[in-house]
């Protein structure tokens, strides 16, 4: 690790000196061992919210020690005032803002960009993830570690043991960057050990303190894990794709597969998978889609998630050259391998290769997906990344037009680089990406360039983004909803901070987005004015005014239910008003409401209301009801249309090892009803028994489309 970088960072003078334990540490939530009594105490946390100019009102004390195999942490989180701890549930990876919690952030590489996070809420539920981009978290990463929380009327105590083999780090170093974060909802206070400006998350690695080891860390021992699974289930199709009823026989499935995790070094990992199965992954929350483009749903499959930022964080919201959910769509993954991690202090690497099967039903040929990413740190926190993405069909039949429509081309390749600008104090940030695609019979105008730049202070945020996407650019393993455009999107936000009263901050935001074709003729423009008000209890209210202009480049059905389309090159303009209102997170009853009222395509009108109500009986029951209602008034042949989407969800966490989820979704736009339940028993760390039941129904008349029951057992053998 570069000691020079640590010496130059913002809070380099804030240090915690860790010493090796002199006795055996028992994880019981009690401060009894002599090693804890000898350890340095980190205290006098700095307040981050509601203000960042004073010491925290809620006291926190932290101690750390270690032995040959584990890093140990003890946190004393004292309470101030009356009121119970506020928590969502006992479920892993809770929401930071909705729980009383304590989190440790660690930069074990010294690049101020990547690392690990470990935490608990006040009821003892664990929270862990990998860090990227200097302060972002991927909570889909799970690993083996131990924690116990003890509660009494004046405090809660956390004691944790984190195995060195569960994380990645550079051997032979004596300094890491770390910070401790505390969230206390009763006192509406967020605090951290190393102070930081309130406009940044406490996960921001640029403002970490320094963990100083009393001896260089030893090389990490090789770690080898096998994670086999067995699965059985029964499924039945009751209808064809066109909605006609079908009396088919039930299909009983019996499958097994294996994942392997191999530590090639202390910071480089190899993942292997054979016949992977993702039947236990939670279903996507449906949304009403009135846009002209495909929607993006995040990856949830565990195999694709560790070091996922090397692959999936490339590009921008609507320019993503790699989107792992394209792998295995409409077919099955046979096997795959991924090597990812750090070569040295400056270089990271990611290599992934996946093979999928031929699927006759969807006319999808067997395919191979290969991705290479090489990441190089520049200066203090900036970086450049070179990448190559390849999708190649196996036994491709180019004369079969149906196959071409289903699976794309014989091959599709993307090659490019991305530069990330990240100065040490986070005031300036940005990135730029350039990509060229290679596809049969598509040459010329097959490139992408996109960039953004943002300047952030306590009171003002100014940003710029542009995208240039060629007409022949093709990303069949990416997410790029549209082609042949040039986009400019400047934005400015101004904030005011009253010294007293119920309002913590308020201020306007103005954003305008222009889309041009590659001849620089205007095709789309959105002007958005928002006035954001944040209250001291952390609730927010934002009135909104928006104006849209659209020239349709292709025919488009404004209802998206298969009616006649509006003609290409017709022009449409309308204005919309509304507001977004989000309640304070510390109450057992929470709610959010978003409304939009205004015009729509073809001089029509649109009323859109989206709401969410949550109620928890902590820490065992969490109920959430999300609903969206869209009322569209259009001339014939579309007429008036009403689309209701309702999605109640029930989470029951009986213990921190037994979980039950029931999720119901009623979607009038897609004419589908979905019911999904999942029971999970974590009978040992990262080893689970799942029982999943899924039903899908047509609407009008209601009859079952398909039904499935799956039982799956996984075991983590280390």
Image (spheres, rainbow, N blue to C red):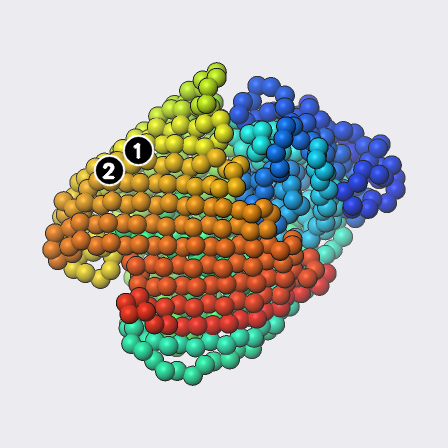
Check the image and report above or below for 425 versus 521: above
Check the image and report above or below for 664 versus 627: below
Which residue is rendered at x = 44% and y = 23% of the image? Answer: 503
Check the image and report above or below for 332 versus 530: below
Q: Nearer the viewer, residue 225 or 679?
A: 679
Check the image and report above or below for 609 versus 202: below
Q: Are marks 2 and 1 in contact (CB under 8 Å)?
A: yes
**How far apart, in angstroms, are the residues tagged by discs 2 and 1?**
8 Å
Q: Nearer the viewer, residue 623 or 180?
A: 623
When asked about the image quadrant of residue 122, the answer is: top right
Residue 278 left/right relative to 193: left
Return the x and y of residue 717 as percentages of the image width and height.
71, 63
Residue position for label 1: 544
Return the x and y of residue 624 as percentages of the image width and height.
46, 50
Return the x and y of residue 220 as percentages of the image width and height.
75, 49
Residue position for label 2: 576
Is residue 531 among the parts visible in the rendering?
Answer: yes
Which residue is rendered at x = 48% and y = 70% of the image? Answer: 332
Which residue is rendered at x = 49% and y = 29% of the image? Answer: 537
When asked about the image quadrant of residue 5, the answer is: top right
- Specify the quadrant that holds the N terminus: top right
Give the residue at the far left of this rendering: 636
Residue 303 left/right relative to 69: left
């Amino acid at each position: 690790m570069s000691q020079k970088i640590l010496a130059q960072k913002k809070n380099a003078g804030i240090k915690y000196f860790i010493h090796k334990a002199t006795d055996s540490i028992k994880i019981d939530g009690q401060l009894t061992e002599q090693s804890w009594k000898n350890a340095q105490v980190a205290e006098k946390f700095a307040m981050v919210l509601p203000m960042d100019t004073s010491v925290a009102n809620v006291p926190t004390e932290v101690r750390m020690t270690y032995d040959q195999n584990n890093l140990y942490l003890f946190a004393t989180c004292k309470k101030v005032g009356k009121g119970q701890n506020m928590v969502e549930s006992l479920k892993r990876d809770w929401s930071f803002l909705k729980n009383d919690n304590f989190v440790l952030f660690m930069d074990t590489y010294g690049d101020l960009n990547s690392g690990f996070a470990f935490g608990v809420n006040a009821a003892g539920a664990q929270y862990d993830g990998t860090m990227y981009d200097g302060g972002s978290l991927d909570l889909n990463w799970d690993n083996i570690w131990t924690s116990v929380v003890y509660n009494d009327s004046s405090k809660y105590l956390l004691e944790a043991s984190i195995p060195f083999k569960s994380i990645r780090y550079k051997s032979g170093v004596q300094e890491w960057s770390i910070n401790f974060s505390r969230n206390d909802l009763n006192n509406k206070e967020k605090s951290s050990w190393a102070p930081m400006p309130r406009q940044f998350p406490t996960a921001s690695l640029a403002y970490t303190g320094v963990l100083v080891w009393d001896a260089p860390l030893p090389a990490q021992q090789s770690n080898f894990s096998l994670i086999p699974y067995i699965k059985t289930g029964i499924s039945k199709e009751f209808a064809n794709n066109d909605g006609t009823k079908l009396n088919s026989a039930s299909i009983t499935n019996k499958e097994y597969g294996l994942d392997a995790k191999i530590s090639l070094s202390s910071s480089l990992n190899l993942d292997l998978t054979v016949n992977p199965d993702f039947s236990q992954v939670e279903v996507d929350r449906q949304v009403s889609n009135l846009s002209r483009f495909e929607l993006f749903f995040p990856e949830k499959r565990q195999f694709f998630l560790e070091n996922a930022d090397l692959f999936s964080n490339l590009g921008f919201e609507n320019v993503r050259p790699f989107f792992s959910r394209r792998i295995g769509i409409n077919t099955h993954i046979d096997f795959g391998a991924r090597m990812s991690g750090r070569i040295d202090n400056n270089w990271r690497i990611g290599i992934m290769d996946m093979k999928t099967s031929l699927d006759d039903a969807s006319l999808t040929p067997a395919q191979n997906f290969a991705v290479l990413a090489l990441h190089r740190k520049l200066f203090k926190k900036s970086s450049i990344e070179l990448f190559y993405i390849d999708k190649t069909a196996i036994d491709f039949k180019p004369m079969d037009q149906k196959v071409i429509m289903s699976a794309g081309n014989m091959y599709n390749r993307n090659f490019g680089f991305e530069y990330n600008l990240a100065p040490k104090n986070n005031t300036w940030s940005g990135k730029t990406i350039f990509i060229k695609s290679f596809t049969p019979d598509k040459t010329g105008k097959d490139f992408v360039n996109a960039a953004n730049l943002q300047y952030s202070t306590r009171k003002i945020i100014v940003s710029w983004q542009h995208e240039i996407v060629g007409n022949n650019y093709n990303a069949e393993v990416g997410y790029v909803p549209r082609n042949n455009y040039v986009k400019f999107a400047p934005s400015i936000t101004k904030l005011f901070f009253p010294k007293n009263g119920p309002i913590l901050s308020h201020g306007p935001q103005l954003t305008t987005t222009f889309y041009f074709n590659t001849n620089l003729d205007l095709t789309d423009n959105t002007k958005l004015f928002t006035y954001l008000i944040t209250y001291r209890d952390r609730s927010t209210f934002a009135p909104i005014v928006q104006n849209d202009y659209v020239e349709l480049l292709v025919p488009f059905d404004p209802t998206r239910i298969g009616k006649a389309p509006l003609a290409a090159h017709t022009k449409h303009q309308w204005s919309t008003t509304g507001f977004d209102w989000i309640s304070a997170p510390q109450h057992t009853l929470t709610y959010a409401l978003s409304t939009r009222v205004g015009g729509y395509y073809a001089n029509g009108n649109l009323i859109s209301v989206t709401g969410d109500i949550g109620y928890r009986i902590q820490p065992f029951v969490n109920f959430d009801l999300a609903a969206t209602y869209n009322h569209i008034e259009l001339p014939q042949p579309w007429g008036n249309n009403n689309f209701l989407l309702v999605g109640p969800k029930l989470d029951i966490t009986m213990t921190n090892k037994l979980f039950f989820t029931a999720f119901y979704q009623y979607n009038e736009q897609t004419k589908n009803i979905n019911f999904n339940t999942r029971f999970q028993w974590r009978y040992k760390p990262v080893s689970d028994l799942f029982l999943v039941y899924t039903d899908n129904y047509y609407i009008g008349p209601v009859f079952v489309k398909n039904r499935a029951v799956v039982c799956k057992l996984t075991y983590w053998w280390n």
